[in-house]
Image (tube, rainbow, N blue to C red):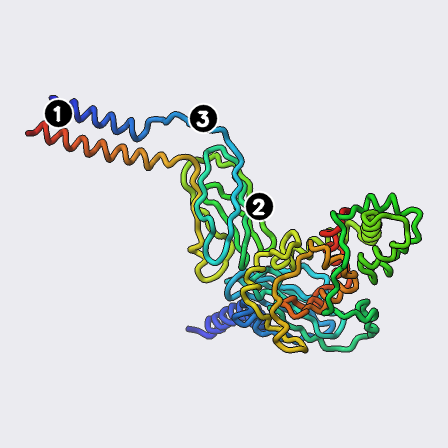
């Protein structure tokens, strides 16, 4: 009986960790400007981190051939020739991690020209750490009860 | 199988072959032009034959990155040449001669070397006399240093100059503007009672009166597409290729004096008043048209029309004057 109750408790705790809505952090949305240098076959910087609700301004500067940037999930893109930098402006209203990639065939390694846009904190990472800790705790507790 | 069935089978097969094969055959007859980065060979073939009055069909594809195609000194929209896709284009030539076609999308440091020629044969009904270019008739030495000995403290303002100009005996004609450097005009105004900064303002006004807003817009567009990658979007000589050019060291172009003069490879800074105010529009026309100067500056004479070069010259001066 005690085993059943503790099992139920652990399952409940797990559900809370996985799905409980987090308190929205009170960070005022701001404007973030990134200058991304695009060259064969990388972006620098290739990882962008913003908060949800921020206005993101990406200035894309190509320094060898024509490159572009396409942000997965947001479905927006821009193309820049060397000498003609292009600006992509959008509001990061979707939380999560998104891949961005070059949308202009820029040479043999073009498919590998990618980067990452992270919007908001990585909640799934923290949730999965919490779940893993809970599982470890659960195993230790159940072992002690059997003994 | 009876006779009529055999005939109908034969007819169907020939019909299908003809309807599919004939267009395919015609399409295959126009040769495919391959575009590659200049380092890997550029256009292949890079010499195309054509005839006056006969439309020239071309099929172009790219083997590496995004390229573009346009013919110099012709009214045409440039087309993009994408890897893995075939671009069809039809050109019509009114006059015989040798035309230059070139890449219009930046495809690397040596993008501008990606050029080829179209040799158009045929007889022209009215051969035009070759007009003499201003820098030639003025007998300007394009390679001589031309720094202005005196420069203004700030950007001269054309608005201030307009107020001062009214009672001055100054020649506002295009001929005068084109054949004189800002410094020369400044120097000629030394007989007047104006202060130095006022004289520079009058010079700015003279430049403004010879510049229309359309030519500035055209010049800006041409500059962004063709010059900014080396000379920088703001004209400061700091374009994305400036470091690469400096690292490349010697230009591969040859001068009459030999390779010793070829260390200067960095693009010119158009915001430097010493250099710009000492150069007349005619001198800049010559430099754009011929290129060289012991640097990697391309030769634009076969690509830009004379009007386009004047637009570019007008735009380049806008880095110096407050219009």
Q: Residue A9: horizontal and vertical position, in percent?
A: 20, 24
**CB under 8 Å between discs 3 and 2:** no
SS at mark 3? loop
Label 2 marks which chain's residue? A
- Pick whichever of labels 3 and 2 is earlier in the sequence: 3
Residue placed under numbered mark 3 in the picture:
A26
- Pick whichever of labels 1 and 2 is earlier in the sequence: 1
Residue B219 relative to residue B267: left or right: right
Question: Around disc 2, counting alpha carbons within 10 Å, would you say few (fewer than 14), some (14 to 19), or many (20 or more)?
Answer: some
SS at mark 1? helix
Residue B209 visible somewhere in the drawing: no
Residue A41 relative to residue B321: left or right: left
Label placed on residue A87: 2
Give the residue furthest to the left. A147
Q: Residue B303: horizontal and vertical position, in percent?
A: 70, 66
Residue B154 visible somewhere in the drawing: yes
């Amino acid at each position: 009986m005690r085993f059943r109750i503790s099992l139920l408790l652990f399952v409940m705790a797990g559900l809370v960790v996985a799905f409980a809505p987090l308190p929205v952090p009170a960070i005022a949305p701001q404007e973030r400007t990134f200058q991304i240098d695009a060259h064969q076959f990388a972006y620098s910087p290739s990882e962008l981190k913003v908060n949800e609700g921020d206005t993101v301004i990406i200035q894309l500067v190509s320094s060898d051939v024509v490159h572009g940037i396409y942000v997965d999930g947001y479905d927006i893109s821009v193309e820049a020739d060397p000498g003609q930098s292009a600006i992509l402006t959008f509001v990061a209203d979707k939380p999560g991690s998104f891949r961005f990639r070059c949308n202009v065939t820029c040479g043999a390694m073009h498919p590998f020209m990618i980067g990452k846009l992270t919007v908001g904190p990585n909640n799934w990472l923290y949730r999965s750490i919490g779940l893993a800790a809970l599982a470890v705790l659960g195993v230790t507790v159940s072992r002690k009860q059997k003994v | 199988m009876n006779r009529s069935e055999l005939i109908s089978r034969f007819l169907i097969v020939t019909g299908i072959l003809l309807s599919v094969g004939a267009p395919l055959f015609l399409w295959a007859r126009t040769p495919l032009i391959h575009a590659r980065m200049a380092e890997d060979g550029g256009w292949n073939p890079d010499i195309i034959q054509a005839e006056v009055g006969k439309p020239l069909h071309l099929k172009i594809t790219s083997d590496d990155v995004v390229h573009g195609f346009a013919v110099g000194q012709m009214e045409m929209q440039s087309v993009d040449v994408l890897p893995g896709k075939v671009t069809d284009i039809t050109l019509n030539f009114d006059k015989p001669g040798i035309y230059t076609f070139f890449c219009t999308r930046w495809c690397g440091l040596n993008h501008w070397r990606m050029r080829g020629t179209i040799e158009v044969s045929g007889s022209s009904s009215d051969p035009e006399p070759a007009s003499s270019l201003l820098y030639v008739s003025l007998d300007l030495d394009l390679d001589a240093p031309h720094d202005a000995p005196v420069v203004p403290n700030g950007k001269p303002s054309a608005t201030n100059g307009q107020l001062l100009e009214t009672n001055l005996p100054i020649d506002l004609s295009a001929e005068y503007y084109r054949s004189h450097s800002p410094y020369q005009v400044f120097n000629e105004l030394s007989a007047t009672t104006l202060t130095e900064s006022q004289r520079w303002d009058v010079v700015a006004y003279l430049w403004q009166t010879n510049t229309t807003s359309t030519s500035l817009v055209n010049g800006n567009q041409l500059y962004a597409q063709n010059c900014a990658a080396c000379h920088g979007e703001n004209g400061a000589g700091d374009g994305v290729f400036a470091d690469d050019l400096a690292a490349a060291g010697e230009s591969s172009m040859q001068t009459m004096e030999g390779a010793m003069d070829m260390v200067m490879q960095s693009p010119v800074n158009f915001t430097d008043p010493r250099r710009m105010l000492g150069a007349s529009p005619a001198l800049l026309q010559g430099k754009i048209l011929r290129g060289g100067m012991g640097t990697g500056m391309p030769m634009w004479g076969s690509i830009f029309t004379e009007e386009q070069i004047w637009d570019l010259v007008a735009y380049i001066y806008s880095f110096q004057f407050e219009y």
